[in-house]
């Protein structure tokens, strides 16, 4: 669920039921600020975002998004899991709107819309 309130509540519950203090709490998200999830827990140093791309079984790229509170150890452990266990290619992204990939993608898509609207290119030309 890509809903900040719902995920915050889930992280508050996880913080209570996950008893291992070295456990990492991670969320797949494309837009929720990780710092908001981190401060909802008593272990903000162990919270990190992981953004998979569709279709996740095929796409190798994964964004790791540490909050400002995330420890270096948590980042390294999450990176190792993504790389060694999941076989994906992790890149680090700052906890800011769009992270890396969507921050690049949105202007590209807007440019395509503007090209179509101004008659520079047809839908077919843009899609191909």
Image (cartoon, helix red, strand yellow):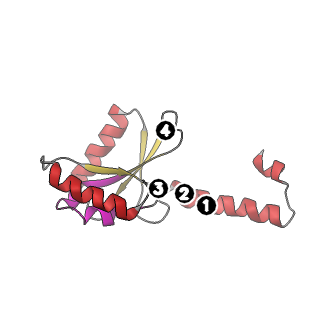
| Residue 43 within the magenta-colored segment of the rendering | yes
| Residue 114 within the magenta-colored segment of the rendering | no
**Distance of label 2 from label 3 (alpha carbons):** 8 Å
Task: Report whether residue 67 is seen.
Answer: no
Task: Report whether residue 105 is seen.
Answer: yes
Give how far across and how far down residue 28 sits, in percent: 39, 50
Give how far across and how far down residue 73 sits, in percent: 22, 50
Query: Looking at the image, how many numbered discs can be counted on the residues?
Result: 4
Which dot marks residue 30? Answer: 3
Q: Nearer the viewer, mark 3 or mark 1?
A: 3
In the drawing, does residue 102 fall left or right of residue 1? right
Q: Nearer the viewer, mark 2 or mark 3?
A: 3
N-terminal label among 4 and 3:
3
**Distance of label 1 from label 2 (alpha carbons):** 6 Å
**Looking at the image, which residue is at 35% across and 51% down?**
27
Give how far across and how far down residue 17 sits, in percent: 16, 50
Residue underneath mark 1: 106
Vertical relation: 1 (above or below) 98: above
Q: Which residues are magenta?
A: 32-49
Give how far across and how far down residue 61 sits, in percent: 48, 42
**Looking at the image, which residue is at 12% across and 48% down?**
19
- Crowdedness of circle 2 by 10 Å Cα count: few (<14), some, many (20+)? few
Which dot marks residue 56? Answer: 4
**Distance of label 4 from label 3 (alpha carbons):** 13 Å
**Distance of label 3 from label 1 (alpha carbons):** 13 Å
Which quadrant is the C terminus positioned in? Answer: top right
Whether pointer 4 and pointer 1 mark residues with C-beta atoms closer than 8 Å, the reply is: no
- Crowdedness of circle 3 by 10 Å Cα count: few (<14), some, many (20+)? many
**Distance of label 4 from label 1 (alpha carbons):** 20 Å
> Which residue is at the front of the view, 97 or 13?
13
């Amino acid at each position: 669920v890509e809903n900040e309130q719902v995920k915050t509540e889930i992280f508050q519950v996880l913080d209570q039921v996950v008893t291992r203090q070295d456990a990492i709490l991670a969320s797949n998200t494309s837009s929720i600020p990780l710092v908001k999830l981190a401060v909802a827990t008593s272990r903000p140093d162990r919270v990190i975002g992981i953004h998979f791309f569709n279709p996740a079984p095929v796409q190798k790229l994964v964004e790791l998004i540490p909050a400002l509170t995330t420890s270096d150890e948590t980042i390294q452990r999450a990176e190792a899991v993504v790389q060694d266990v999941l076989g994906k290619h992790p890149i680090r992204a700052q906890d800011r709107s769009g992270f890396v990939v969507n921050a690049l993608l949105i202007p590209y898509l807007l440019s395509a819309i503007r090209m179509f609207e101004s008659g520079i290119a047809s839908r077919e030309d843009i899609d191909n």
